[in-house]
Image: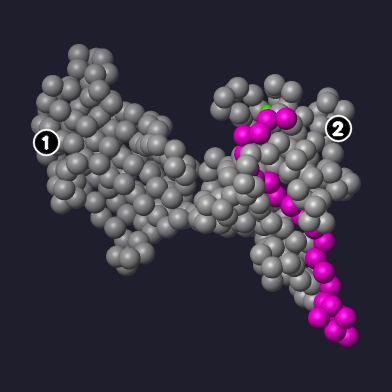
Amino acid sequence: MAHQTSCGYVRCGSSDQYRCGLIYSPGYPTAFPSSVICLWTIDGPSGSYVSLVLLDVDLPGYLGGACTSRVLQIRDRFLTVGWNTIHGLCRGENEQRLFVSSSNDMQLAMLATRSGGDVGGTRGFMATFNISTFIASGQVQNLPDDAGFICPCGWHLFRRNCYQTFLHNVPVNWKESDAKCREVGANLTSVADRQEMEFLHLLLVTNVVVKRIADPKLYIGLYDIYRNRTFAWTDGTPVTFTDWSPVDIRTGFPQPDGADINFCVAIVMKNVWGTDQWYDVACDERDTRSFICKGKAERVTRSGNDV
Ligand SMILES: [Ca+2]
């Protein structure tokens, strides 16, 4: 890894809480070195994500018309999963291109060696980045409707309901997680609309990504009642909103796909910036310890009956 002084890097904002910056190859745009190995890690606060725009790319990775080495690599990861190269460039791209990280960090690697290609006459690259956090489209805290309602310790109040993510000591299947919620007088959560989903997403960013007190796969109360993609909530509320993942990376199919007897539903977090992470999953599989319960909040009475 090269020293930061030799790899171009400018941050903006105060030094302890920078939120944006500029990254460029050594000598950009005039003097690309014959050999350079640089690694930049953009590291935002836990729960944030990184947006990177490649503004100008002109690299020496081509030799005789063929791509000989991925000179510039963009790497992403989520939670403890290792770095995954999501894009590699040999030379340049005509259009400016945006990359968004799954969670709070992103890596850029520059691996240009003299044998790797035609070094002469290239500018290198320049990119800008911004660090952001997920912002709900509406208010999700201190709602007027919630005045006078309370939740059990550790549960989260939203529109007169209480929510909590659980981390069971051993993996559970969907039905077992449903029973665990009922044991505490709740149900697996239903989600009535976008606002409730955004409230839940913020809870998941905190509990799954920042505090790590829940697994990234969490069962919710939706299930395929007739096994023909007719979905219902276990708490009996009508299905008025869904937030299916547009694609399952493993199968390539948009969700719900009914694959592998997928008759139950889980939120499988793969990034912090999008709520649309619902998957239909196998009901009997025990590959997560987590689920989300939702119960009615308690009204606090002035007479002191509940105190
Ligand atoms: Ca599925």
CB of mark 1 near ligand 1 (< 8 Å): no
Pick whichever, 279 or 9, lies toward us. Answer: 279
Circle 1: residue type: Pro
Residue type (three-letter) at the residue carrying disc 2 = Ile
Give the quadrant of ligand 1. Answer: top right
Is 288 magenta? The answer is yes
**Residue 156: percent from the left, percent from the top?**
69, 63
User: Can you give x and y, in whole percent of width and height, for residue 299 in the image?
Assistant: 84, 73
Q: Residue at x 25, y 23 (%)?
A: 69
Q: Which residue is mark 2?
A: 225
Q: Residue furthest front?
A: 169
- Residue at which label 1 appears: 33
* Residues in magenta, as a range: 284-307
- Write the residue at 25% across / 29% down: 71
Q: Could you tell me which residue is drawn at 61 percent across and 56 percent down?
A: 202
Decide if residue 171 is in sight here: yes
Quadrant location, the C terminus: bottom right
Q: Looking at the image, is mark 1 or mark 2 earlier in the sequence?
A: 1
Does 88 sit above or below residue 235?
above
What quarter of the picture does the N terminus occupy?
Answer: top left
Is 243 situated left or right of 215 in this image?
Answer: right
Q: Quadrant of residue 279?
A: top right
Residue 292 in the image, given as x and y percentages of width and height: 70, 50
- Residue 244 seen in render: no
Specify whether residue 235 is painted magenta: no
* Badge nearest the viewer, 1 or 2: 2
